[in-house]
Amino acid sequence: MPKTAGTYHIPILAEAALNWWLTEPSGRYIDGTFGGGGHSRMLLERLSPEGRLLAFDRDADAVAHNPIDDPRLVLIHHNFAYAPQFARFLDFVPVHGVLLDLGVSSHQLDEGSRGFSYRFDAELDMRMDRQQSLTAAEVVNRYSEEALTRILETWGELPRAAAVAARIVEARRGRPILTTQQLADVALPLKPRSMKSFRFLSQLFQALRVEVNDEIGSLRRFLDGMAPLLAEGGRMVLITFQGQEDRVVKAFVRSDTARRHGIRLRTKNVVRPSWEERRRNARARSARMRVLEKVSAHE
Ligand SMILES: C[S@@+](CC[C@H](N)C(=O)[O-])C[C@H]1O[C@@H](n2cnc3c(N)ncnc32)[C@H](O)[C@@H]1O
């Protein structure tokens, strides 16, 4: 049964994100993380007939599912890291607003066979774009113990990362670790007593997913590449779900690139979903939104 926009993914911080994202109804906008198209649909409702939206998703499921039939929207199956190149090539500049609502969609988590969630026993895949070759099974079975430790520590902030990496290396000597269940069985005995199993496993799976999809590298390339393409007064609305992503955003604000292109942080404090939204939508619990704005174009 085809999914409706609401069952594919519920947009997070929808009203607040839209109010920052939209600055000029007849402008050019980019949605780097189309997903179920929730944020895009809301933007299109407020754009004038001249407004344009260029959207990206690296997951073919999101592109195939696209519920929006609107000539002002062009949806591209690609990593948003290349959005700046597409924008230049398509003469889609300057850009009045970009939105990144990072991480995975509910659809990706709920499709057990994709291997994103420890809730389903499946092959260790975790690729957002199934055309790429690197899978979570490759990372778990081929990376060195040092590399695994670094990934678990940095991308997952996993307690006892070195011990978990050592245990993975030990276990895979017997037979390769090919499923989500096998991985959970290998790692769980090292969970600190004070930590809930679901939290430990979420952090472990998050670490692998971020590595498989080069999520931090994509975010850095996007921010650097978009900086010169923003219109004066144009904004970047960035919704992150883990500490490392938020640190990349904060580091970008302090970077030479941001300074050179007159980009400043507009939200003094990070914007969090309301208690009510967090109650209704578990995925909203870790969301943090920051907004950047080009205040003056030096170049
Ligand atoms: C949290 S969902 C976005 C939901 C969307 N805002 C909505 O309202 O339905 C994130 C989506 O971004 C996509 N994605 C994540 N990283 C990406 C990247 N580097 N390039 C393109 N798409 C990406 C994922 O495949 C997923 O579909």
Image (cartoon, grey):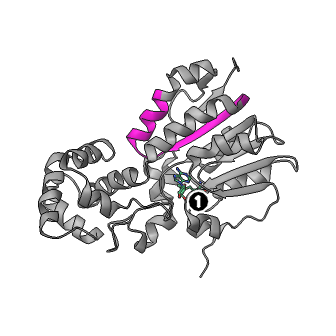
Q: Is residue 253 left or right of residue 39?
A: left
Q: Is the residue marked by circle 1 packed among few (<14), some (14-19), or many (20+) residues within 10 Å? A: many
Q: Residue at x 27, y 48 (%)?
A: 152
In the image, ligand 1 is in what quadrant?
Answer: bottom right
Q: From the top left corner, tell me how far across and down residue 10 is, in percent.
A: 57, 60
Q: Secondary structure at mark 1?
A: loop
Q: Is residue 173 left or right of residue 31?
A: left
Q: Is residue 192 visible?
A: no
Looking at the image, residue 68 lies above or below residue 166: below
What's drawn in magenta, residue-wise? 231-251
Q: Residue at x 57, y 69 (%)?
A: 7
In which quadrant of the rendered image does the N terminus lie?
A: bottom right
Q: Is residue 196 left or right of residue 230?
A: left
Q: From the top left corner, tell me how far across and down residue 83 is, in percent.
A: 63, 45
Looking at the image, residue 297 lies above or below residue 153: above
Q: Is residue 249 magenta-colored? A: yes
Q: Is residue 228 left or right of residue 167?
A: right
The residue under label 1 is which amino acid type?
A: Gly
Q: From the top left corner, tell me how far across and down residue 167 is, in percent.
A: 13, 57
Asked whether mark 1 and ligand 1 are closer than 8 Å, the reply comes as yes
Q: Give the residue pinned by disc 1.
A: 35
